[in-house]
Amino acid sequence: MNPHQITTEFEKAICDYTGAPYCVAVDNASNALSMCLTYCKAEEKEIVIPSHTYPSVPCEIILAGGRVRFEDSPKHLTGEYQLKPLPIWDSALRFTANMYRPGQYQCLSFTGQWKHLKMLKAGAILTDSHDAYLWFKRYRFSGRRECSYHDDHFDMLGKNYYLHPIFATIGLQMIQAFYNLDGTKKDIPDLSLPYPDLSKYEIYKT
């Protein structure tokens, strides 16, 4: 069996549960944000995020060439929020039935003990754009197509963000817990986690 097919099956399972037309699995949510920021051409753009959030979010904005502007927010971050004005969402604390927002890029996190789908280290992007889906799939795989590198003809730069099939196998097993015994989807409440106020740190002032 082609090992890439396992990752594809995991992506299909995420689509079925979230209602997204396409899913691209990656190694973590921070790299999902990085990909989306690159695809949406964040360079030189001012991007507004909550002052209380996970530190990798402003890092990814700055590393993509964007400028961070913090807005006041509660200490406990819940669910998801938009990286305004881009159609990118940090959905690290949300994973529930039919959650997909049409026309958006939602970045999911399956990393760590505090997430709903605890896969040790993984993430995903939900989208309804076929062009974005194809770009994400190759960019996350060092620009490669999903074949042996001896058979590829290299014509795209990318990063090594691919979700290993072993982790995808774990995800396929665990996602069954998000369905009732009759096959209906479970609605899962958003997580709520406390985060530091990042607006007070000079490193994020761009």
Image (cartoon, helix red, strand yellow):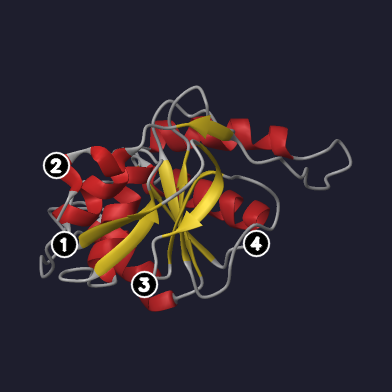
Q: Relative to 188, say whether 99 is above or below.
A: below
Q: Please tell me which of labels 1 and 3 falls first in the chain.
A: 3
Q: Please tell me which of labels 3 and 4 falls first in the chain.
A: 4
- What kind of residue is marked 2? Ile
From the image, state whether disc 1 or disc 3 is nearer to you.
3
**Disc 1/disc 3 C-alpha distance (Å):** 21 Å
Residue sitting farthest toward the right: 182
Q: Is residue 169 left or right of residue 166?
A: right
Residue that numbered label 1 is attached to: 152
**x%, y% of residue 78?**
57, 42
Dot 2 falls on a residue whose secondary structure is: helix
Cβ atoms under marks 3 and 4 closer than 8 Å: no
Q: How would you rate the neighbour count of disc 4 (Cα within 10 Å): few for under 14, some for 14-19, many for 20 or more?
A: many
- What kind of residue is marked 1? Asp
Residue that numbered label 2 is attached to: 203
Quadrant position of the N terminus in the picture: top left
Q: Nearer the viewer, residue 148 or 122?
A: 122
From the image, state whether disc 3 or disc 2 is nearer to you.
2
- What kind of residue is marked 4? Gly
**Disc 3/disc 4 C-alpha distance (Å):** 17 Å
Q: Relative to 40, say whether 69 is above or below.
A: above
From the image, state whether disc 1 or disc 2 is nearer to you.
2
Q: How would you rate the neighbour count of disc 3 (Cα within 10 Å): few for under 14, some for 14-19, many for 20 or more?
A: some
Tally of marks: 4
Q: Please tell me which of labels 1 and 4 falls first in the chain.
A: 4
Which of the labelled discs sits on residue 132, or is there none?
3
Cβ atoms under marks 1 and 2 closer than 8 Å: no
**Residue placed at 22% from the left, 46% from the top?**
59
